[in-house]
Image (tube, grey):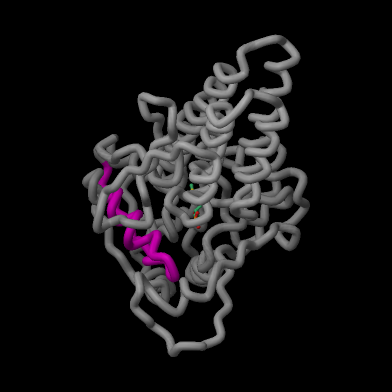
Amino acid sequence: MTIPSPIGWTPGHAVRILDQTLLPDEERYLELETVDAVAEAIRTLRVRGAPLIGIAAAMGVTLSIRQGAPSLQAIQAASATLGATRPTAVNLRWALARMERRAAAALAGGEDLAAAMRAEADAIWQEDRAMCVRIGAAGAALIGGDAIVLTHCNAGALATGGMGTALAPVYTLHEAGRRVSVVADETRPLFQGSRLTAWELGRAGVPVTVIADGMAASRLRRGDVSCVIVGADRIAANGDVANKIGTYGVALAARAHGVPFYVAAPTSTIDRATPDGARIPIEERSADEVTGWRGHQVAPAGARVWNPAFDVTPAELVTAIITDRGVFAPKDAAGAA
Ligand code: MRU
């Protein structure tokens, strides 16, 4: 892939991230040396996207060992700090629970805790990379050939440990020589679609057209969009899907115009413990994300704001869920997790 990895290790075992808040203007990498620095990066969306924040948090846990005497308590404290950053993406909790279980097993077995934690974080990262490849293959087979894909937010290489989820079928078809292009919703209020999706597709040489969010319904009515593919932050047991705010509206428009609406996600995004979308905690973010952009005011000072970062698309609007274990009807996806 020609897209730089948004995550990695420094030679000194700190966590290296691409600061996504600066894209597309600037490609700057940060070296995060402490648990608190990783937590700040997740909270502020320097590193973002459900699978990637799980990977970043797992890597962040390893930093607690550099900061003090290795112990299960230190691992659990780091996990609590990182787990409190963002509530919606279940991958975060999934990765942290996995790190805590591995720490307990390592200590019980007399293993070197630092080595075990590094290996587990690397495993979470590499497994995610492999899951992206399988999602890409399953999605490409489903689409079958040339396509125009509409997407919302960024569920590509910048959001995962590999080639992405929603964009994985696009990259797979592109690499196979198919004529595939993307219509990217800009994704207000933080512009993950125009800033990030358009940036990474451009790097990969995939044609992309950016539209404002309010244009998606008209574009779907035109009849040239083959399908919608979005990512997910959490898929409930009944197949309801939490994803970036605005996804639900796209799903309604896709249904109205007979366009298939696919959700692409690794099985680590499926939460069997949450029965339906109403129980998914939805992150609310600060008002200034809506009233301004990079210091420029776009609403009157003092305007009241509602800023949920995610919405829930009911399972009945989802045509299928594309996972690393195959393509499922929404109600059957939890059975695959
Ligand atoms: O707030 P963000 O940018 O972390 O939101 C990201 C999304 O909603 C993505 O669509 C989702 O996490 C899937 S990423 C593969």
Of 222 and 229, nearer the camera is 229
Residue that sits furthest to the top in the current view: 110
Residue found 60% across the figure and 44% down from its top: 82
Asked if the stretch drawn in magenta spans residue 195, the answer is yes
* Image coords of residue 335 (percent x, y): 71, 38
Of 171 and 154, nearer the camera is 154
> Which quadrant of the figure has residue 114?
top right
- Left or right, residue 321 beside residue 106: left
Residue found 54% across the figure and 20% down from its top: 119
Q: Is residue 44 above or below residue 248?
A: above
Asked if the stretch drawn in magenta spans residue 78, the answer is no
Of 221 and 285, nearer the camera is 285
* Image coords of residue 123 (percent x, y): 53, 24
* Image coords of residue 210 (percent x, y): 30, 65
Residue found 55% across the figure and 81% down from its top: 305
| Residue 169 shows up from this direction | no
Write the start and end of the magenta stretch as one range: 178-201
- Left or right, residue 238 beside residue 255: right
Q: Which quadrant is the C terminus positioned in?
A: top right
* Image coords of residue 33 (percent x, y): 46, 37
